[in-house]
Every structure is written in structure tokens, then in C-alpha cells.
Image (cartoon, rainbow, N blue to C red):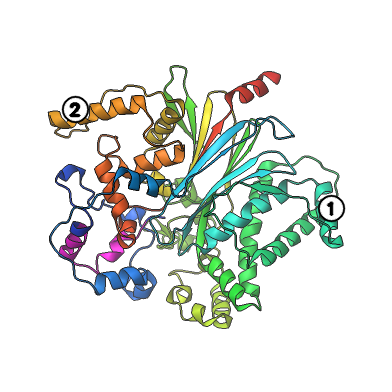
Amino acid sequence: MPAPTQLFFPLIRNCELSRIYGTACYCHHKHLCCSPPYIPQSRLRYTPHPAYATFYRPKDSWWQYTQGRRYASTPQKFYLTPPQVNSILKANEYSFKVPEFDGKNVSSVLGFDSNQLPANAPIEDRRSAATCLQTRGMLLGVFDGHAGCACSQAVSERLFYYIAVSLLPHETLLEIENAVESGRALLPILQWHKHPNDYFSKEASKLYFNSLRTYWQELIDLNTGESTDIDVKEALINAFKRLDNDISLEAQVGDPNSFLNYLVLRVAFSGATACVAHVDGVDLHVANTGDSRAMLGVQEEDGSWSAVTLSNDHNAQNEREVERLKLEHPKNEAKSVVKQDRLLGLLMPFRAFGDVKFKWSIDLQKRVIESGPDQLNDNEYTKFIPPNYYTPPYLTAEPEVTYHRLRPQDKFLVLATDGLWETMHRQDVVRIVGEHLTGMHHQQPIAVGGYKVTLGQMHGLLTERRAKMSSVFEDQNAATHLIRHAVGNNEFGAVDHERLSKMLSLPEELARMYRDDITIIVVQFNSHVVGACQNQE
């Protein structure tokens, strides 16, 4: 989520900031220096307010870092070597190739590449990918947490199960329930495709299972088994809304286990956006809640690449979202429900999981906090009530679902958290991935954007272009390749190793001031299968 960079400015004088940046990186080319980018108010997570100093206070490590240390004013050079850069960029990369025939149908997905680059410590983004075993299709998603990683972690573990259950026919739900009743082994619902760093919470597994079981029991009671058609769009919406409801209910009920009790409260009081794709043959559904994005890469007849957006950001830049919010609340709240481009003047996304501070009544919030553990009761954030809080809920987790029928020219799908889209234009994202996957680089005229470029610099740009033609750098993973560009691109759209090294060398206390967590999944489609499906129809 966008970093509250300007919140740090009251804490540090400009001269102190310059000394911090001076020790973090030194650049003798001013126009290529990684000086902190200007971040407008509209991209900050929260608006500062003097009355809520502790609410906006950064992490203790950063606070202590700025208050308790002196900084040398002498610039120091420090660059990572190319192998060190690659080690950092590839630490969280994961690739999966889908078998052409999975036992049920020929897959329209060739495989996917995913990767993450943290800015927060710990990273607040999460990712998930799984194959549906009792129905057809694959699920892939990215999750962007805020106010901590608890909610994004829970959603990344649980949402796909809720979606898979929502897609199951009545007979399969009955079979699963009977297996639980009799103590028999359960049918596997999902096959997960995980990086070793993508963990599941073992402590909460029983709680999560019981909530999921209650959900499928209700689906059994509601469905008499007469209808066999499953509406994917409806299933996605129901799964999102039900999981968010369970997150809220678990926090209200609590748990006798003190660890679990604190966990469910942390999940509920933090928040997460989600962007999930369900691919079944030529049917592609994207369910989005928040400001992560899904972008389709389309190869035109002349070999060039175009981007097709399959999701809408749910924030103040989306006029329909602003209008929706105003219509859901009394007219006398029209000026306060969206203020300074934020929900109630505070929250950037207008849809999210968790964030019960924007959903529960004030009485319910106070009751849960007072009866909760001391860690919660002593937390200024949880006790804080948003201004102009009259008619909750103000926030929803209901997704906006987009359907797209795949065509042979649809080559890949990029799912990414807003850390990518803040740094790169969608057309550049699609072009870079497309060229990486095909190994073809269309030679466009080099644009310098009004900069004064020396002959030496132009020679360097042309040399780099030649290197691109002979290799795809060090990356076999398309998501890694995209992150390399997102972090290391200079003004001319080329990866600058010096800049990349500096950005990756920043201490974790400073990294968040330059960029957000970045999480990317690149899904590659099988054009032959997609074309064959079209011909059959």
C-alpha cells in the first residue's frame, strides 16, 4: 500500500533527511540519482493529524533509527555486485508449469511465474496459486495488506477454499460433509503451488476449518440439489463476502486460546485488498477488491503488444466508487464520507477485507477492545475512532467481477499489487513481459523525454539495447524480470544496474520511503488450446 512518506517529515528536518539519503546512496549523475520520489498526498495511505500522533507513528525500529542515531554527512559509495542483486531479486521467485492434460481437460494455462520484493519489514503482500481438484480451473491471486500483514496472510490462506467450496456441486458438498461426520479422509479440494516462504498458519487451521465447514453446511441447506449450474461470478462474490464476514465474526466471538484470540483480532483490525483470477478453459474471471490490478497482455498481428485492463481500482480516482459510497450514506455525509481522496479522510482503498474499524459500530468496537487482550486495549490504533463515523459500515469486501473470454492473441495475464503499478505504466508492463516471453524486442526509437543526453550516455543506451537482443538478462522468471525493471529503470526505460543496486541496498527502515512491496504473478496462456476451444464452438 502507498507509504505515508510525508508523515515522516515532521519527525526529521530536511538537512537530516539529506544526510540519511547521503549515506544510503551516492550518485555522481544527478538525473540518475535515486533521490526520494515526490509522492503526492493522493497516494499516501493516511492523512496526518496532530491529534493522532501515535496512530500515525512509524514502526519503533524506524522511530528509534531517526531519534537515536547521528548521521555522517560524508557520502559513501556502496554498490551490490550483479550476483548479489540477482540473489535478492530471485529470493522469492517461483515458477510452475501446468501439465498439458491434468486428467480432466486440456489446460488453457501453460504455467505461471511469481515473485515478491519486500519494502515493508515484514512484507505485507501475499500471493496464492492453486489448481481446483473437484472442479475445473486454476485460482491465482495477490493480496496487499495494510496496518500489518495479519489480514493479507489470513486471506491468502483461506479465500481459495471459500471459492472452491462455492463452486462445488451439491453432491460433492454432501460427500465432503459425510466424510467429516464419519471421520473418513476428506477429498482434496485444492492443489497448492507454493514457494517455501509462503507459509500457512498451523495454529489457526482448526478454527479456519470450522468456519469453512459452517459455510458449506449452509450451502447444503440452501441448495436442494435441483440446480447443477454454478455461476462463477456469483460464487466469487459469495466467497469474498463470506470470508470477510467470518473474519469479523471470529473477532467478535473470540477464542479461549489467548494466542488465537489475539490473532483473530489482529486479522480483523488490519486489512487487505485482493485481486484473484479464475481460469477455466477459455473462461477468465477476475474478482477484485481494492487497488491491485489484473492486466491482459495481447499480441497484435504486427507483433506489438497492447494492454487490456481487467479490473478497476476501488479508490477516489474511480468516480463510480465515489458515487457508490455517497449513495450508501445519508446526504449530510456527502462531504465527509470521501475526504482528501480517502474513505473518511483516512483509508485509501474503498473496498478491503478486515478493517473492522470502518465496518463495526462504535459500541461493538469498544466492547471487543475492552474485553480483548491487553495488547489490543493498549493499542492506540485500535482505540481510535475515525472522524465523522455515523453510519457504518463504510467499507465492503464485495469484489467487482470481470469476465473475459480468452482468444488466441491473449498471451498472458499479469496480477500485481499496487507497488508495481505505482512505478510502471500498464503498457510498459505488458511490453516488457511480452518481449521477455517471446524473446522478441521491437526496435522503437529511443526516447529521451527532453533530457540532455551526452554521446556517451546514448552509446550506453544502444549497448544495452544490443544486450537485450542477445539475452533476457539473468531472468528465467517473467515476474523477476518485471521487478528488475520496476526498481531499476532509469528515465529512458532501461535497467540501470547502478540505480538497481542502490535501491536494493537501502536499509529496511528507508526502503519503504522509496517504494511499496511488489508482488507479481504472470500467467501464460496456451494459445493452441484456446484456439482449439474456439474452433470447436
Q: Is residue 179 visible?
A: yes
Question: Could you tell me residue 91's position as x and y percent?
Answer: 44, 49
Q: Along the line of sight, which residue is nearer the eye, 356 or 257?
A: 257
User: Which residue carries the number 2 mark?
Assistant: 459
Question: Could you tell me residue 409's position as x and y percent?
Answer: 53, 23
Q: Of circles 2 and 1, which is in front? A: 2
Q: Can residue 311 be seen in this view?
A: no
Q: Quadrant of the N terminus?
A: bottom left
Q: Is mark 2 on a helix, strand or loop?
A: helix
Q: Against 202, is 32 above or below?
A: above
Q: What element carries label 1?
A: helix
Q: Along the line of sight, which residue is nearer the eye, 206 or 392?
A: 206
- From the viewer's perspective, tell me whether residue 175 is left or right of residue 261: right
Which residue is found at the position 47% from the left and 49% from the top?
92
Which residue is found at the position 69% from the left and 29% from the top?
106
Pointer 2 local density, CA inside 10 Å: few below 14, some 14–19, many at least 20: few
Question: Could you tell me residue 268's position as x and y percent?
Answer: 56, 67
Q: Mark 2 or 1 closer to N-term?
A: 1
Q: Quadrant of the C terminus?
A: top right
Question: Could you tell me residue 387's position as x and y percent?
Answer: 43, 70
User: Which residue carries the number 1 mark?
Assistant: 174
Give how far apart the Cα atoms at labels 2 and 1 are.
68 Å
- From the viewer's perspective, tell me whether residue 250 is left or right of residue 186: left
Q: In which quarter of the image is residue 158?
A: bottom right
Amino acid on which disc 1 is placed: Leu
Q: Residue 89 carries which label?
A: none
Q: Along the line of sight, which residue is nearer the eye, 11 or 401?
A: 11
User: Which residues are drawn in magenta?
Assistant: 3-21
Task: Considering the whole magenta stretch, tell me its main secondary structure.
Answer: helix
Which residue is found at the position 59% from the left and 59% from the top?
200
Q: Against 266, is 127 above or below?
A: above
Pointer 1 local density, CA inside 10 Å: few below 14, some 14–19, many at least 20: some
